[in-house]
């Protein structure tokens, strides 16, 4: 039984798609790149909780003034 060139190409592409699909699911099951439900922390990782305070920026005249010493005063005539 002889197959035409187009039939061989179609079967070759179909075979490659099947191999790619099987490989994807095999890799997915064997690696943590696609993490599974509940698999978020490595077993060797020590779980510790770090709390940090979030400081929101304070703006004055379009500038962030956190950690700056601000003096508000009036400039008088002939004052330098």
Image (cartoon, grey):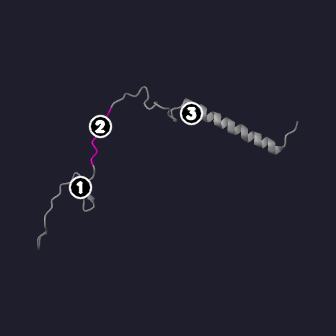
Magenta residues (range): 49-55
Element at label 1: loop
Q: Is residue 52 above or below residue 59?
A: above
Which of disc 2 and disc 1 is earlier in sequence?
A: 2
Disc 3 versus disc 1: nearer the observer = 3
User: Residue 5 occupies which quadrant of the picture?
Assistant: top right
Query: In the image, what residue occupies the spot 15% across and 59% down?
Result: 71
Q: Nearer the viewer, residue 76 or 22?
A: 22
Query: In the image, what residue occupies the spot 56% across and 30% down?
Result: 29
Q: Which mark is residue 51?
A: 2
- Mark 2 is surrounded, within 10 Å at the Cα level, by few (under 14), some (14 to 19) or many (20 or more) other residues, namely few
Let me know if residue 54 is in the magenta part.
yes
| Label 1 sits on residue | 65
The span from disc 2 to disc 3 (Cα, nearest Å) is 33 Å
Q: Is residue 80 above or below residue 25?
A: below
Element at label 3: helix
User: Residue 42 occupies which quadrant of the picture?
Assistant: top left
User: Residue 49 occupies which quadrant of the picture?
Assistant: top left
Q: Which mark is residue 28?
A: 3
- Mark 1 is surrounded, within 10 Å at the Cα level, by few (under 14), some (14 to 19) or many (20 or more) other residues, namely few
Q: Are marks 2 and 3 in contact (CB under 8 Å)?
A: no
- How far from the left and from the top, in percent, is residue 72? 15, 61
The quadrant the N terminus occupies is top right
- How far from the left and from the top, in percent, is residue 45? 40, 28
Element at label 2: loop
Query: In the image, what residue occupies the spot 60% across and 31% down?
Result: 26
Q: Main SS of the magenta segment?
A: loop
Say left or right for 64 vs 80: right
């Amino acid at each position: 039984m002889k197959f035409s060139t187009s039939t061989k190409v179609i079967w070759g592409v179909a075979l490659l798609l099947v191999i790619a699909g099987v490989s994807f699911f095999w890799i997915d099951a064997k690696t943590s790149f696609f993490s599974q439900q509940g698999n978020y922390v490595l077993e060797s990782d020590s779980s510790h909780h770090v709390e940090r305070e979030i400081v929101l920026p304070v703006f004055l005249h379009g500038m962030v003034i956190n950690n700056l010493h601000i003096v508000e005063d009036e400039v008088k005539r002939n004052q330098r």
